[in-house]
Amino acid sequence: MSALDALTSALRCLPGVGVKSAQRMAYHLMQHDRNGALQLAQALQVATQQVRHCTLCHTFTEDEVCATCADPQRNRSQLCVVETPADQAALERTGAYKGRYFVLMGKLSPLDGIGPKDIGLQKLFDRIAVDGEDAVSELILATNFTAEGEATAHVIAQALKGRGVHVTRLARGVPVGSELEYVDLGTIAHALVDRR
Amino acid sequence: MSALDALTSALRCLPGVGVKSAQRMAYHLMQHDRNGALQLAQALQVATQQVRHCTLCHTFTEDEVCATCADPQRNRSQLCVVETPADQAALERTGAYKGRYFVLMGKLSPLDGIGPKDIGLQKLFDRIAVDGEDAVSELILATNFTAEGEATAHVIAQALKGRGVHVTRLARGVPVGSELEYVDLGTIAHALVDRR
């Protein structure tokens, strides 16, 4: 196999990249951006060596404990469960949450063969069982409002029944700035039920 | 900048990859495919070191002359001009062409600031000027039938006027397997004019 074919085949490990895209990427890098290719190789090696999981919240970090968990200003008794670091970043951008996070790094998806063991559920339960100053009194389920995200939230809520943790879910309702006429029925129904 | 941010930013050197895709790729590699990440790093380094241009046809190769140009079975007097190695591969798959190629590695595109110097035009003219057993008697223009590809073919044809080379262009016409009712007007008009 030539070096160019090997590169094309290696690029296919990226999600969403098929044969044609991989070939286009390989040609582009070799023709126009060899410097970028070397930087990418370097970044891949460094990240593979250095990135690991935070022992408290399971997100990606280069240290024992991530910056958010290590922040003494954070409310230690609130724990917000999200699917990915990207979801965590979206919540952080609101500035409305001052507690800590737990990042599942996935979601339950039986159709894809992803069960409780493949996402960090046991780690989450261990985290909640912690006593002392890191003890959790409220767990906020902020998984996505998709079928898989809802199922994941449901499984977590069921498993924590009777454990003395107050479990809440992000509110469902009409998005800010939207007109009722164009909002889907399920969302309006939820907003009616959960009215306050 | 963290190793993960560095990786996300490095992934953006790939064509068609924006901020969100780069982040998704970085998360995926770190969470599910560190082995693939290391293989990709390796392939990038090897390709950057070893891939260069064929001295005869300008395509990517790891040797002085690519396998197609080195093949003694090939008709040395025919030269087919294509935009990319992918286009060359498409022609090769037909099995209908037994001559040699010249790969421009691009196309004229004044709007993107790509002029004759940015694609291998001078190299092509040098190649055509070669005498002896590698001398070219027919040049087949197989650039794409887009605005840029047509412009590129036109510029090459103009520049080679009076140089004693027979310049031809791939035939325009109705694609195999198509019904006239659904073929665009420009194609039918060309097929009428070029009828044989």
Image (cartoon, coloured by chain):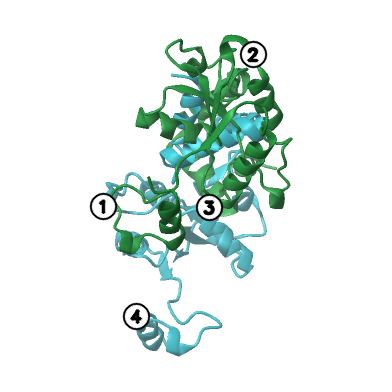
Chain colours: A green, B cyan
Chain at tag 4: B
In the figure, B71 relative to B98: above or below?
above
> Tag 3 or tag 4, which sits nearer the N-term?
3
* Badge 1 density bin: few <14, some 14–19, many ≥20, Cα 10 Å: few
Q: Amino acid at mark 2?
A: Asp
Respond whether the residues carrying marks 2 and 1 are from the same subunit: no
Respond whether the residues carrying marks 4 and 3 are from the same subunit: yes
Mark 2 against mark 1, which lies toward the viewer? 2
Residue B194 seen in the figure: yes
Chain at tag 2: A
Label 3: which secondary element: helix
Pointer 1 residue? B110
Pointer 2 residue? A131
> Tag 1 or tag 3, which sits nearer the N-term?
3
Pointer 3 residue? B85
What whole-number distance in Å separates the C-alpha atoms at marks 3 and 2?
63 Å
Mark 3 against mark 2, which lies toward the viewer? 2
What whole-number distance in Å separates the C-alpha atoms at marks 3 and 1?
22 Å
> Tag 1 or tag 4, which sits nearer the N-term?
1
Mark 4 against mark 3, which lies toward the viewer? 4
* Badge 2 density bin: few <14, some 14–19, many ≥20, Cα 10 Å: few
Q: Amino acid at mark 1?
A: Pro
What whole-number distance in Å separates the C-alpha atoms at marks 4 and 2?
76 Å
